[in-house]
Image (cartoon, coloured by chain):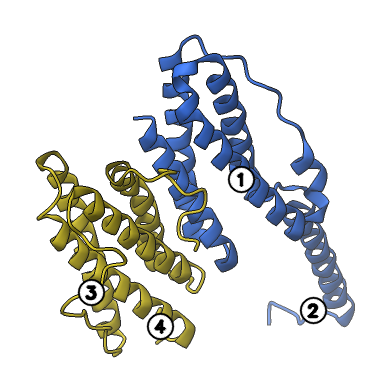
Amino acid sequence: MTGPLDDADTRSAVQAVLGAEHAAVWSAGLATAYLPVEDQTALADAALAHRERRDALVALCEAAGVAPAPSAAAYSTPRPVTDAGSAAALLAVAEDDTACGWRAVLERTDDAELRRTGVAAVVSSATVGVRWRGLAGTQPLVASFPGTR
Amino acid sequence: MDHPSPSRRSVLRATAGLALAGSALTVAASCGNDDERPDELEAPLTAARADAALAAVAGRTFPDLAARMGPVAEARRAHADALAAEVRRARPDRADAVAAPVADPAPPASSSAAAAALRTSLGAARDAGTDLAVHAARYRSGLVASVAAACGGLAETLA
């Protein structure tokens, strides 16, 4: 039987985006302490989306007999997180990282389910990214090609 | 024996007929796939050009929209350029279709009508691209998903 992770290139892309999803879940947890109350619902929704994608990736790895990339206990943030703006900037970075990871997966699989998950992930990253960039005060609110470094 | 075995001549005739039918089908299929049907990226390319033109007109006509329309026009122009480059690379026969210019659209009746029209067309581009990225070739899937994602984000900026 062939599976979506038979190819080594696909496997490493899936493991890389799983690492990015772990980091996004951790970042959302950190940001809850700093974001204003009116952004907490959006943050909870984004965090849930990352947990669901993380769980789907872990299940995919386990079904293929591949050990899923583990999460770290903590991550070093590109900039210190001290207030709502810097927390939102971290969330934007985490969204960009997952978008890049998923775009790489899309280019390395023909599996329709993995493709559907991946394109939804890139779209939701760019969509919620508008809110985080607005809160962080960074422009542009939308990259022309999300998922590209 | 009610069914006599066919003569060699009639078998050969039948095979010749099949061969002819087969080649006719092949010709028809290759016309349809390679020579006449538009590339799958032409529809998103046309949508990107139309959005860029509408955003540019709306930004010029309604000063209150200028700050939000500038990024939409810029991103959609970049999308059109990237999609056009890929069509020209993969389908040189479609270069003329890809080069077709877009006429400037009439300015919408009001600032809110302009924002609503773009929000609708960006949402449609996001949804169409989401479907296309699932089925497109690997090397195109990332580009199409990226364009769809930008459209989703841009629609959000007009919400």
In the rendered structure, the colour chosen for chain A is yellow
What amino acid is found at the position of numbered circle 1 in the picture?
Ala
Q: What element carries label 4?
A: helix
For marks 2 and 1 on the same chain, the one whose residue lies earlier in the sequence: 2
Instruction: Name the front one of labels 3 and 2.
Output: 3
Callouts 2 and 1 close, C-beta under 8 Å: no
State the residue position of label 4. A11
Instruction: Name the front one of labels 2 and 4.
Output: 4
Do discs 2 and 4 share a chain?
A: no
Q: Residue at x 43, y 65 (%)?
A: A100
Instruction: Name the front one of labels 3 and 1.
Output: 3
Q: Distance between the residues labelled 3 and 4?
A: 23 Å
Task: Report which quarter residue B60 is drawn in.
Answer: top right
What amino acid is found at the position of numbered circle 2 in the picture?
Pro
Q: What element carries label 1?
A: helix
Q: Residue B78 carries which label?
A: 1
Q: Which mark is residue A75?
A: 3
Label 1 packing within 10 angstroms: few (<14), some (14-19), many (20+): some
What chain is the blue one? B
Q: How far apart are marks 1 and 4 (CA)?
A: 31 Å
* Towards the viewer: A122 or B18: A122
Q: Is mark 3 on a helix, strand or loop?
A: loop
State the residue position of label 2. B6
Q: Distance between the residues labelled 2 and 4?
A: 57 Å
Question: Which chain is disc 3 placed on?
Answer: A
Q: Where is residue A19 in the image (x, y as percent from the top left)?
A: 30, 76
Q: Residue furthest top?
A: B109
What amino acid is found at the position of numbered circle 3 in the picture?
Tyr
Do discs 3 and 2 share a chain?
A: no
In the figure, B94 relative to B140: above or below?
above
Q: Position of residue B139 (x, y in %)?
A: 59, 66
Q: What element carries label 2?
A: loop
